[in-house]
Image (spheres, rainbow, N blue to C red):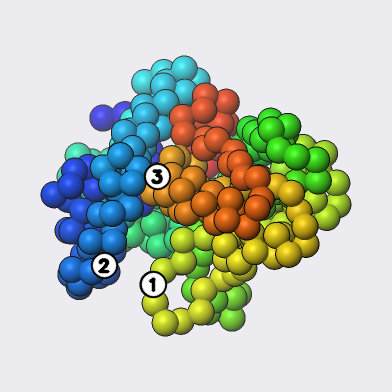
Amino acid sequence: MAEVSVVLMAYGTPRSREEIEPYYTDIRRGRPPTPELLADLVRRYEAIGGISPLAALTEAQRAALANALEQREPGRFDVVLGLKHAHPMIEETGATLAANGAQKVVGLVLAPHYSSYSIGQYQDRLKASLEGSGCDVRGIESWASNPAYVGFLASEVQNGLASLPPGSKVLFTAHSLPERIIAAGDPYPSELRKTAVWVAAAANLPTGSWDIAYQSAGRTPEPWLGPDILKAIDELAEQGVPGVLVCPCGFVADHLEVLYDLDIEAALHSSQRGIAFARTASMNDNPDVIASLAEQVIGALA
């Protein structure tokens, strides 16, 4: 096998209608969803065409990263997937690497903002799966200020604002997490703000023309980070803001939280409040960003 195995980690998604229930059960830590919850999730998938494109996009990102690494250091790297809620799961990938005698592994998560609740868990699961193998395991914990990613988002923000009325506002969003992470000193909110500040500067956004919101909070009784995107849109409507450009900088591929939560739900909510709506494109397998991530992988081995 190659000298270095890169484990590209992502959330995972069902690849067919039949996989939705076991996928949802895994997210719920083995507790099957109620018929009502399952029906609601199926409805959301049907609204975006029946199933999410995330599996195909994640594979495209893996292939693009493998190609970028091969161009830089031929024959040195293998790139494999490890998923949190779908196969191949992180533990399965780690076990395969250990069985094949992997000597060096770099873990890279397809999420730019570090949180112990997200990226930290991915990296911990990878390390645990390789424990005792003698493998040198390293992880990239954050790429919140990756120059290529910032540049990509800044260009998308400028293009998006050009399609909206003057005076429109930009909302940078990421997946909400339970508020208790703040009490534990988790850097996730500051990681998100870091990206927003860098993108706003690169896009020459005036002070006060952008803000941060969260989306796609879990359905649990505990409080989650806010403001929620829909409440943020309500506040913009009350202020008389004519349009909103959502930049979901916490997500790096088109999937349910983008294609439904934003393109359908948030767009409809904006229309009902009389606000023009637009969204920046997702990174997906953008070659410039993938190339920059390849450089980070190489740097992690220095």
The quarter of the picture where the N terminus appears is top left
Tell me the kind of residue under disc 2.
Answer: Leu
Pointer 2 residue: 37
At 47% from the left and 54% from the top, the residue drawn is: 265
Q: Position of residue 147 (x, y in %)?
A: 67, 36
At 36% from the left and 21% from the top, the residue drawn is: 75
Query: Separation of disc 1 and disc 2 at Cα?
Result: 10 Å
Q: Position of residue 134 (x, y in %)?
A: 30, 51
Pointer 3 residue: 255
The answer to whether one can see residue 284 in this image is yes
Q: Earlier in the sequence, mark 1 or mark 2?
A: 2
In the image, 251 versus 33, the foreground residue is 33
Q: Position of residue 90 (x, y in %)?
A: 28, 51
35 relative to 64 in the view: left or right? left
The answer to whether one can see residue 12 in this image is no
As drawn, 123 above or below 297: below
Query: Separation of disc 2 and disc 3 at Cα?
Result: 19 Å
At 21% from the left and 53% from the top, the residue drawn is: 20
Which of the 4 quarters of the picture holds residue 221? Answer: bottom left
Q: Please rate how many residues cluster around mark 2, counting C-alpha atoms within 10 Å: few if below 14, some from 14 to 19, many from 20.
A: some
Evaluate if marks 1 and 2 touch, with contact meaning CB atoms under 8 Å apart: yes
Query: Separation of disc 3 and disc 1 at Cα?
Result: 18 Å
Q: Earlier in the sequence, mark 2 or mark 3?
A: 2
189 relative to 166 in the view: left or right? left
Pointer 1 residue: 219
Q: Please rate how many residues cluster around mark 1, counting C-alpha atoms within 10 Å: few if below 14, some from 14 to 19, many from 20.
A: few
Q: Which mark is residue 104?
A: none
114 relative to 253 in the view: left or right? right
